[in-house]
Each structure stands twice: as structure tokens, then as C-alpha cells.
Amino acid sequence: MHVKNIQQLKELREILDKNLYAGHTLITYDLILDILQAHLQGRSLTIKELCTGSIKSALNTRKHIDLLIDDGWIVLSNGLHDKRHRLVNATDKLILLVDELLERQ
């Protein structure tokens, strides 16, 4: 059973490696998981929340947020009350990829 689980994890990693931008790191995976979790809970995260929740520097985390935006995986929108608080949202592209990954299970 453990061998099968490890194999599935490797397959998922290979799919993500093929689809994500060149140079992605574990930060990218953490960001995707945090953004998707918020999406499933019906809320959006701010850039500040993502940066402060990261184990890496805010500058490095922000670089990967920008790469995810440039590659069409996430989008930013203005907060309802304050445009300084940009909200991060998953795009359909990201949600469809994750749905495909989960269907492989």
C-alpha cells in the first residue's frame, strides 16, 4: 500500500512539473495548496497572508506569486473595502489541473 501511495505522489509531482513554470519550488506547491484551501472554504487570501504564512522570505514568496500570476494559475483582485489589500484567487486553469490530479487517485 505504501509503495502505491509513493508512486501516486511521484506521478502527481511529474504532472505538476510538466505544467508549472520552469524554476518552481516547494514554495510554489505550498502557495497552491494554501490558495486552493482558501478557495474551497469560499474565501480569498491576501498577498500579505500568503507571504507571512510562508516559511521562506516574503521577497522569495512574492516572486513565486508573481510567476503563478504570469503563468495564469492565480489572479489578483482588489479587496472590497481597501484596494491596498489585493486578494489572491485560483483561476479555472488551476482548479481544472487539481481536479485532473484528484481524478487520477
Image (spheres, rainbow, N blue to C red):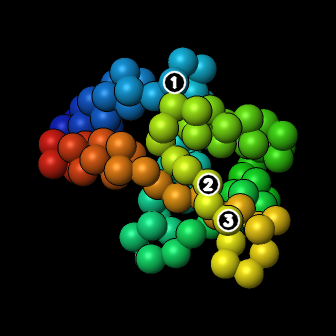
Q: Residue furthest top?
A: 22
According to the picture, the residue beneath numbered tag 1 turns out to be 21
Q: Give SS at disc 3.
A: strand
- The dot on residue 76 is 2
Q: Are marks 2 and 3 in contact (CB under 8 Å)?
A: yes
Q: Quadrant location of residue 47?
A: bottom right
Q: Position of residue 37 (x, y in %)?
A: 46, 65
CA distance separating discs 2 and 3: 7 Å
Query: Is residue 32 in sight in this rendering?
Result: yes
Q: Is residue 26 above or below residue 39?
A: above
Q: CA distance from mark 1 to mark 2?
A: 18 Å
Q: Pointers 1 and 3 in contact (CB under 8 A)?
A: no
Check the picture and name the quadrant holding the N terminus.
Answer: top left
In the rendered image of this protein, does residue 12 appear above or below residue 96? above
Q: Amino acid at mark 1?
A: Tyr
Residue 29, image x, y percentages = 52, 42
Mark 2, secondary structure of its residue: strand
Mark 3 neighbour class, 10 Å CA radius: few under 14, some 14 to 19, many 20 or more: few
State the SS at label 1. loop
Question: Few, some or many C-alpha atoms within 10 Å of disc 1 (few <14, some 14-19, many ≥20)?
Answer: some
* Of the pair 85 and 105, the residue shown nearer to us: 85
Residue positioned 39% across, 70% down in the render: 40
The circle drawn on residue 78 is 3
**What residue lies at 78% left-to-right and 75% top-to-bottom?**
82
Q: Is residue 40 left or right of residue 82?
A: left
Q: Relative to the observer, which residue lies in front, 49 or 25?
A: 49
- For the residue marked with disc 3, what is the amino acid? Asn
Residue 1 in view:
no
Apparent side of residue 6 relative to residue 100 in the rendered image (left or right): right
Q: Nearer the viewer, residue 79 or 20?
A: 79
Indicate the quadrant where residue 14 lies: top left
Q: Earlier in the sequence, mark 1 or mark 3?
A: 1
